[in-house]
């Protein structure tokens, strides 16, 4: 009798223990659910680190704007952005001095084998601008080339008043200079030797604004009503005229890394390429989203 009772008691005790264990397990699983009954996903690892970038002054406003927004979203990340010209950006990223090199032009043959990876982030429209005292409104591409090389030196030669033309351009390291040279100057010609050289797009704009009879070239996001935009071949600059193929002066903006970007730099580049940033911010800064241009 006693033996039978002991076996039953043992069996009941084992069942109770197993049941309690299952209940504890279930209780632990329940703790991983939120108030809505759904299971929480693990929190994403917060980014941290420093990114350095240099190069194109034309691209500077976009990169600085993106950097400010990205740092707001990721407080553990610091992004330092400097200008200096596309040539500087390419040289420094190839040497490993910065994480990202910004450029208005593709890396040339001198960078072959350096391991540079191209990230195309926007389209930069370029315009020809003059001081507001210039009476000419429209020039041809051929006339523009002759003005920038110094062959045409007075506005009266292209239908304006008798006024000396002062050319204001960029330094040799500038991607804007390289682009305009390839787009408008004859292949065997260079910019006029007496052209005034400025080291940034902002400085060029200020110089055109303050110099009577002057002409310069710059990316459209910097242009405002303190200077005058010239029509080219009868076409007025507008984003719509770029989309339609009527306006020919624009270049792809590049952000180069040496090899594939590290985790933090990749996240920053991905943010710039995101639908949200391309649609709202790139257009807001007067650049053209990279995927919006008709091929």
Image (tube, rainbow, N blue to C red):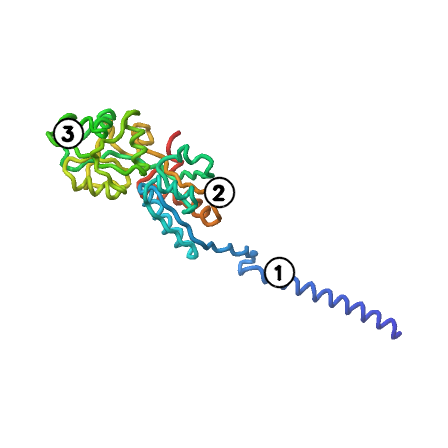
**Lower sequence index among marks 3 and 1:** 1
Q: Classify residue 177 as left or right of residue 278.
A: left
Residue 67 placement (x, y as % from top left): 37, 50
Q: Which residue is mark 1?
A: 29
**Lower sequence index among marks 1 and 2:** 1
At label 3, counting other C-alpha atoms closer than 10 Å, the crowd grade (few under 14, some 14-19, many 20 or more) is: many
Residue 32 placement (x, y as % from top left): 58, 60
Q: Classify residue 270 as left or right of residue 156.
A: right
Q: Secondary structure at mark 2?
A: loop
The residue closer to the viewer here, 81 or 11, is 81
For the residues marked 1 and 2, what is the alpha-carbon distance in whole angstroms?
41 Å
Q: Residue at x 37, y 42 (%)?
A: 89
Q: Is residue 275 above or below residue 139?
A: below
The residue closer to the viewer here, 137 or 3, is 137
Whether residue 37 can be seen here: yes
Give the label, 3 or 1, closer to the camera: 3
Residue 25 placement (x, y as % from top left): 66, 62
The image's mark for residue 155 is 3
The image's mark for residue 164 is none
Q: Quadrant of the C terminus?
A: top left
Q: Which residue is mark 2?
A: 260
Q: Is residue 260 above or below residue 30?
A: above
Residue 264 placement (x, y as % from top left): 46, 50
């Amino acid at each position: 009798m006693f033996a039978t009772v002991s076996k039953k008691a043992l069996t009941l005790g084992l069942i109770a223990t197993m049941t309690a264990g299952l209940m504890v397990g279930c209780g632990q699983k329940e703790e991983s659910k939120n108030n809505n009954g759904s299971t929480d996903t693990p929190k994403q690892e917060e980014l941290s680190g420093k990114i350095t970038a240099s190069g194109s002054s034309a691209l500077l406003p976009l990169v600085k704007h993106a950097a400010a927004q990205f740092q707001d979203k990721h407080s553990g990340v610091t992004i330092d952005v400097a200008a200096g010209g596309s040539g500087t950006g390419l040289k420094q990223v190839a040497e490993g001095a910065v994480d990202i090199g910004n450029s208005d032009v593709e890396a040339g043959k001198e960078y072959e084998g350096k391991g540079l990876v191209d990230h195309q982030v926007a389209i930069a429209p370029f315009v020809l601008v003059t001081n507001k005292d210039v009476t000419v409104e429209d020039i041809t591409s051929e006339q523009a080339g002759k003005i920038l090389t110094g062959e045409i030196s007075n506005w009266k030669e292209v239908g304006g008043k008798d006024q000396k033309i002062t050319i204001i351009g960029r330094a040799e390291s500038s991607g804007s200079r390289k682009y305009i040279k390839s787009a408008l100057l004859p292949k065997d010609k260079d910019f006029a030797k007496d052209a005034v050289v400025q080291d940034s797009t902002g400085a060029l704009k200020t110089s055109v604004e303050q110099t009577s009879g002057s002409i310069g070239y710059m990316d459209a996001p910097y242009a405002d009503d303190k200077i005058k935009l010239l029509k080219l071949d009868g076409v007025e600059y507008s984003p719509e005229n770029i989309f339609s193929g009527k306006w020919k002066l624009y270049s792809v903006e590049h952000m180069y890394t040496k090899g594939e970007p590290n985790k933090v730099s990749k996240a920053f580049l991905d943010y710039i390429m995101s639908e949200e940033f391309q649609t709202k911010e790139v257009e807001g800064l007067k650049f053209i989203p990279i995927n919006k241009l008709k091929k």
